[in-house]
Image (spheres, coloured by chain):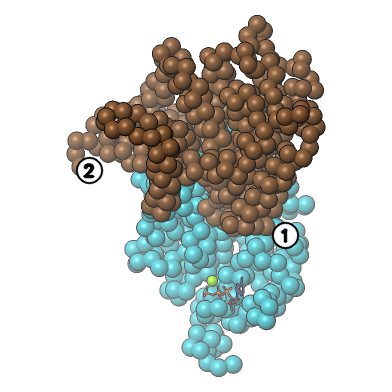
Amino acid sequence: MRAPSSPSEIAAGDVLLAAENISLSFGGVKALTGVSFDIRKGEIRAIIGPNGAGKTSMLNVINGFYQADHGTITFKGVRRGKMRPYEAAEFGIARTFQNVALFRGMSTLDNLMAGRTLKMRRSFFWHILRHGPALQEEVEHRRKVEEIIDFLEIPHIRRVPVGRLPYGLQKRVELGRALAMEPELLLLDEPMAGMNLEEKEDMCRYIIDVNNHFGTTIALIEHDMGVVMDLSDRVVVLDYGRKIADGAPNQVKQDQAVIDAYLGVAH
Amino acid sequence: MLYREAGQFKTNYFADQAVFPIRQDRIGVAIILLLAFVAIPLYGSNFLLQAVVIPFLIYSLASIGLNLLTGYTGLLSLGTGAFMGVGAYACYKLTSLFPGVNILIWMICSGFVAAAVGVVFGLPSLRIKGFYLAIATLAAQFFLQWCFVRIPWLVNYNVSNAIEVPQRMLGDIVITGPNASLHTRYFTVLIIVVAMTWIASNIVHGRIGRMWMAVRDQDIAAELMGIRLLRTKLLAFAVSSFYCGVAGAMLVFLWYGGAEAETFNINQSFFVLFMVIIGGLGSLLGSYLGAALIFGLPILLRLLPDALGVPMHSATIEHMSFLIVGGLIIIFLIVEPHGLARLWQITKQKLRVWPFPY
Ligand SMILES: Nc1ncnc2c1ncn2[C@@H]1O[C@H](COP(=O)(O)OP(=O)(O)OP(=O)(O)O)[C@@H](O)[C@H]1O
Ligand SMILES: [Mg+2]
């Protein structure tokens, strides 16, 4: 496991991640054009914009799944151009997906345990025996995972293969799997899409709790404006791959460019 | 409510992380072990041992090997036969070159040789999946089989161009070769298979098994969680080929007593794949059930006409078992990819609530 080259400790309120001048294109399609913004430690940062604005692409660049054509990402003071996804995970970036991407054949418990993979260190030899250190480690991590299961109120589905769960619960398990990584930065791609009101309220509560109790910094993509206004500290707005606004929720809401983008005014 | 967990409270996560948390399961395993170690050798006929139980055990091990790769990691392989062959030829070469070292050690070491070969042929798996990977492993199958035929060094330049299993001892006991007793071979196979099943079960229930399944179910999400795809897949290829290699070595040294390149042809690969599909992808128990069905079915079919008093030609019986196995494969592929193992789980679930419908 490789640690960040010079991990500087970041105090709450300082910049945790800075994206500078990020551009990304697929063939002729420009998904992102010169986007710069930052995420401060401890905040909930919303990323909004109409469909196809490039929000998901932005998250994919942050955790290394896409390589930006231009621009850099600075995370915890370490500046990078290129990075592999597993490196992002090692840096402490976890995420959930717009279309649930759980390990469908595995139980809730195993999904969350899989989230602990990076933190487990016992060698293959001990795993062969499943004794001593390997079992010890397994139990330690199980304890941590059970805390998350309690926190998300899903003990009843512990042993259920997640493919059989209803959609709302799958989203919750996916959040749990990301939390199991104990990330420093949590990227949530439309965590409430397709949920009913009650499920949305629960999810909001979990997000706020994660932010408050664990101090996890969160970047959140969400279409529901009410949710964005309630949850987020700051909002960045994308449209056609460009940043068109950035600021406090109230401020952004009144921004003419944002109103135009959402109303579909021609550019 | 024959099968229930009520009243069995786990007081800690040690107990709950156990492989068999339910008491009835543990009793079941104990009974099976007792049968295998005591009842079968005491009461089983020579025919039963030689024609049914020994091959069943060896093929169960090969199925476990393929299942680790295909069922747990989601990488389809058609090279099982060749990887078994690598184990057999490696064991033959090793024991010919170093006859002083115990044959059991060489059987295990031949697994390592097969693992190394498996890793080489697993390298394309980073870029290709599914059907295309299956074709790549098919190439491995043909290439390796070509080696078995064309490299006479592998068979010590025997004129027969075949492996001729030499006599090897453990202390005073003859383990391999024509003079090895049936019971010695049976116990050797049994001990190796039981030990390796235990190890496989340990692996799939821990971090490594979860990594494999994560790659199988959602490789992108797995990678974004810090699981390195290539390493994980290659480890699966290595462990899988190790199991197939040891199974191949046992097949030749403890069952056939000799083998030529044809033994490890593509049919062998499909044979093992069928067991995995019928038994259940992603289940160790399924590997056993699949092998049991494929070896048990022809025997049942042979007994059935006698019992019913309808005489039947042995060729007819063979054809019938082909038909039934083929039909089962289609049914399982379409209806229940988790195979017999899943049916067993459903039965257990029913027993748990029996006699109530829910
Ligand atoms: N892998 C890809 N290949 C080709 N084009 C892509 C790919 N990923 C994204 N795009 C394109 O990039 C643009 C931005 O897509 P992205 O998914 O980032 O939008 P989004 O803001 O997340 O939209 P939505 O609200 O619908 O989720 C779209 O035009 C999309 O078609
Ligand atoms: Mg999106």
Q: Quadrant of residue A224?
A: bottom left
Circles 2 and 1 on the same chain: no
Q: Is residue B179 left or right of residue B291?
A: right
Question: Which residue occupies 61% across, 66% down?
Answer: A59
Chain B: give its colour.
brown
Residue B165 visible to an observer of this rendering: yes
Instruction: Determine the residue located farthest toward the left in the rendered image.
Output: B356
**What chain is colored cyan?**
A
The residue type indicated by label 1 comes to Met
Q: Is residue B325 left or right of residue A233?
A: left
Residue A162 visible to an observer of this rendering: no
The spot of residue B44 in percent (x, y) is: 42, 16
Q: Using the image as rendered, state which of residue A47 and residue A189 is in the foreground.
A: A189
Cα–Cα gap, marks 2 and 1 = 52 Å
Chain letter of mark 2 equals B
Queried on whether the Cβ of the residue with tag 1 lies below 8 angstroms from ligand 1, the answer reads: no
**Is the residue marked by circle 2 packed among few (<14), some (14-19), or many (20+) residues within 10 Å?**
few
Disc 2 versus disc 1: nearer the observer: 2
Q: Please tell me whether mark 2 sits on a helix, a strand or a loop.
A: loop
Question: Which residue occupies 24% across, 31% down?
Answer: B1
Q: Please tell me whether mark 1 sits on a helix, a strand or a loop.
A: loop
The spot of residue B351 in percent (x, y) is: 27, 35
Tell me the quadrant of the picture where the N terminus of chain A can be found.
top right
- Mark 1, residue position: A83
Q: Which mark is residue B358?
A: 2
